[in-house]
Each structure stands twice: as C-alpha cells, then as structure tokens.
Amino acid sequence: MSTETITQENCAAGITSSAPWRVRTVTVLPNYCLSVTCNDGTTGIVDMSRLISSELAGIFSGVQDKKLFNQVRIELGALTWPNGADLDPVWVHEEMGKNKVWCVSG
C-alpha cells in the first residue's frame, strides 16, 4: 500500500492559515490511520479504525471504503473526505497534543 502526503495552503480570502491548530500535512497510513502535522509543529497519529466500525459512526461509516478513506484532504485546516465527513482541527490538535496517538471513537 502506498502512502500519500498532502500539503495544502489555505488560500481562501479572509482565511488565516497560521492558526496553530490547523492541519498542515496528512499522510495516509495502514489500518485507517493518519499521520498529521499541524501549523505549530504538533504531530501525531489519528487512528480512525474504531470510529468507522462503530454503530455510531454515522457519516464516517462511508470511509470504511479504503478508496474513500485514502481520499482525505485538507480543507481550511481540517481533515475532510469527499462524502462530507470531517474532523474538527481544534479537536485533532488537542488530542494529539495530549497523547500523540488519538484513537477516535464514536
């Protein structure tokens, strides 16, 4: 399986891309995990495996499809998927700052 690193600048008018909690890069890892770096250098792993298989997954159940999961992108500093699922970048930053590995659960 190949990994992909996405680096994206937020270029929309009026958007400040320097907020420390904004996601700067994301790399797709095996087993529904993401390696994430925020603007302030905070790094960590977001493990989505529990969430996407949970009965409470909601919109995240769609990213069980590996092709869709691998299409994660950065929009306005947040991790997003084409089906509309997204993770709050403040929450991502906070959880990675505490533990370096965030096991997201539903």
Image (cartoon, grey):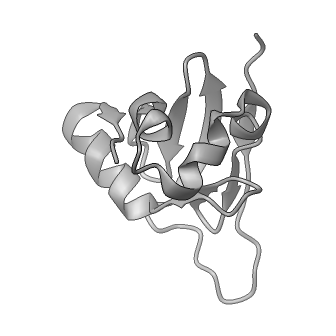
| Relative horizontal placement of residue 28, taking residue 32 as reference (left or right) | right
Q: With respect to residue 78, does 33 lie above or below?
A: above
Residue lying at 58% horizontally and 77% vertically, measured from the top left: 16
Q: Is residue 95 in view from this perspective?
A: yes
Q: With respect to residue 90, does 98 lie above or below?
A: above
Residue lying at 22% horizontally and 33% vertically, measured from the top left: 99
Q: Position of residue 100 (x, y in %)?
A: 30, 31
Q: With respect to residue 10, does 30 lie above or below?
A: above
* Residue furthest to the top: 1
Q: Position of residue 9 (x, y in %)?
A: 72, 60
* Residue furthest to the bottom: 14
* Residue furthest to the left: 98
Q: Nearer the viewer, residue 95 or 57?
A: 57
* Residue furthest to the front: 55
Quadrant occupied by the N terminus:
top right
Residue lying at 51% horizontally and 38% vertically, measured from the top left: 36
| Relative horizontal placement of residue 90, taking residue 3 as reference (left or right) | left
Q: Position of residue 50 (x, y in %)?
A: 39, 32
Q: Nearer the viewer, residue 85 or 17?
A: 85
Q: Is residue 21 in view from this perspective?
A: no
